[in-house]
Amino acid sequence: MRRLANTSRRRRSKKIARVVSRGLVNTKSLSFDGTNDAANWASNSVIPGLIGAGDFSISWWVKKDDFFPAGSGSSPILWGSLFFSGSLTGFFINAFADGASGSLAGKLQVQIGGGSSTSTDFLTLTSQNDLRSSVGDNTWHHCVLTSNAGASSRTGKLYVNGSEVPTNQTSNNVDFSGVDLGDIAIGSVTFNLGSNAFHQIEVDELSMYNSELSSSDVSAIYNSGVPADESSRSGLVGYWRMEDNGNDSSSNSNNLTITGATFTDDVPS
């Protein structure tokens, strides 16, 4: 009986250690079923306004049943938007499928700006290597996108699980603040002239900053695979904990409207 009691106490201690880090209690994530679930902000201007004309960073935890799915397309690991008003603009953070064309299979790509016209892209980052052997299915991964605003063009970096991912990149503009990138919604690809597409995904601890996080910052946020408290980090402009609501814990209060998605106790640990 004593052995059983000790085992039970150890299990409880491990569970507490899993969800508590640097004062953070993380017990929930937001799950999208890929059918009709989404979480979006009050207006199209929220995300462009937060990333603006200066440096920025976006950090989030993501889990997918099939990270690099079968087929020839791509699916979001956070969101995707396509907006048409005289020209195409959009914001995609994608993983390319097993059968993607050319050399894109198994790679990650971020594209902000000109949709299908690369001449108007603000920033495109594509991982150089096939990541299928290192980014597994049905497992939590920590991702970070950082961007430095130069005088006439941007640079960017991608990190997965605390390590920088080598990328190829193009950029020819700086300021996102006045650009309509569409109705950006977590868990979906939105298109103002057609039907939205929805994707199975789990997301936790999404945060945004008006600075370019350093590699040591990224390592601290990754925290060996357990989310840490970001409420006091300099430059924080958005912080969505996904703890039973879509509230923004930063001072900007850009709360999410959640449609269909459900909260689950499956969290990074």
Image: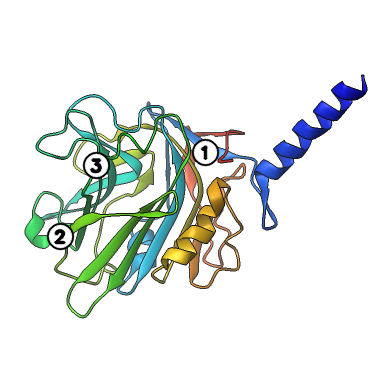
Residue in the picture at 81% in, 27% down:
7
Which mark, by number, is residue 107? 3
Q: Amino acid at mark 3?
A: Lys
Q: CA distance from mark 3 to mark 1?
A: 24 Å
Across and down, in percent, residue 49 comes to: 36, 67
- Under circle 1, the secondary element is strand
- Please rate how many residues cluster around mark 3, counting C-alpha atoms within 10 Å: few if below 14, some from 14 to 19, many from 20: many
Quick check: 63 above or below 155?
above
Tag nearer the camera, 3 or 2:
3
The kind of residue on which mark 2 rests is Asp
Q: Quadrant of the N terminus?
A: top right
- Which of the marked residues, 3 or 1, is nearer the chain's N terminus? 1
The residue sitting at the bottom extreme is 151
Camera-nearest label, 3 or 1: 3
Residue that label 2 marks? 121
Q: Residue at x 61, y 45 (%)?
A: 243
Give the residue at mark 1: 30
Relative to 137, 253 lies left or right: right
Query: Residue 235: which disc?
Result: none
Q: How far across and down, in percent of the image, does residue 100 sit?
A: 16, 33
Q: Position of residue 141 (x, y in %)?
A: 45, 42
Quadrant location of residue 191?
top left
Residue sitting at x 36%, y 38%: 134
